[in-house]
Image: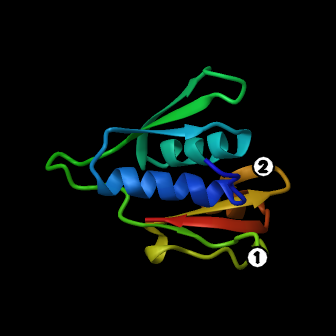
Amino acid sequence: MGVVTDPIADLLTRIRNANTANHQTVDIPASRMKKAVAQILLDEGFITGVEELKDGPQGTLRITLKYGPEKEKVITGLRRISRPGLRVYTSKTEIPRVLGGLGLVIMSTSKGIMSGKRAKREGFGGEVLAYVW
């Protein structure tokens, strides 16, 4: 595989594709940023598990996707907002809401990667990485 210039977009695309194909798990090359994004998805209830596998120098993240009792998808949409060609920043007072608060905003702040709700509560603005709903 070639060099990935946007690892967060790659993570979101792999999750979206596995979710569309109704896979139970998806394997993603590991990094600290990807692990932090996956941990937010786990904390907010969009996935059921994150496991770090130590294979090779980089390692792999195995994400277990979450489905409802009738196999309905918990993650219905993922969108990358800030990308390498166009960065999107927001202040602490203008953090966007996804689906009227039902969705999730993933942000990169000076205190690390966190959800939009937590960033608003702690008073941080930053880069808007993605929306999940």
Residue drawn 63% across the image and 73% down it: 81
SS class of the residue under badge 2? strand
Q: Position of residue 32 (x, y in %)?
A: 72, 39
Residue drawn 53% across the image and 57% down it: 12
- Colour convention: rainbow
2 vs 1, front mark: 1
Q: Is disc 2 surrounded by few (<14), some (14 to 19) or many (20+) residues within 10 Å?
A: few
SS class of the residue under badge 1? loop
Q: Is residue 59 above or below residue 46?
A: above
Please tell me the numbered disc located at residue 112: 2
Q: Is residue 2 above or below residue 65?
A: below
Q: Is residue 10 visible?
A: yes
CA gap, disc 2 to disc 1?
21 Å
Residue drawn 49% across the image and 42% down it: 42
Residue that badge 1 annotates: 85
User: Which residue ends up furthest to the front in the rendered image?
Assistant: 1
Quadrant, the C terminus: bottom left
Q: Is residue 128 left or right of residue 91?
A: left
Q: Is disc 1 surrounded by few (<14), some (14 to 19) or many (20+) residues within 10 Å?
A: few
Of the image marks 2 and 1, the number of the one nearer the N terminus? 1
Residue drawn 61% across the image and 38% down it: 29
Instruction: Give the residue type at disc 1.
Output: Gly
Q: Is residue 31 above or below residue 41?
A: above
Q: Is residue 30 left or right of residue 88?
A: left
Q: Position of residue 27 (x, y in %)?
A: 49, 37
Quadrant location of residue 119? bottom right
User: Which residue ends up furthest to the right in the rendered image?
Assistant: 110
Please tell me the numbered disc located at residue 36: none
Instruction: Give the residue type at disc 2.
Output: Gly
Q: Is residue 129 above or below residue 63?
A: below
Q: Position of residue 68 (x, y in %)?
A: 23, 48
130, 93: nearer the viewer: 130
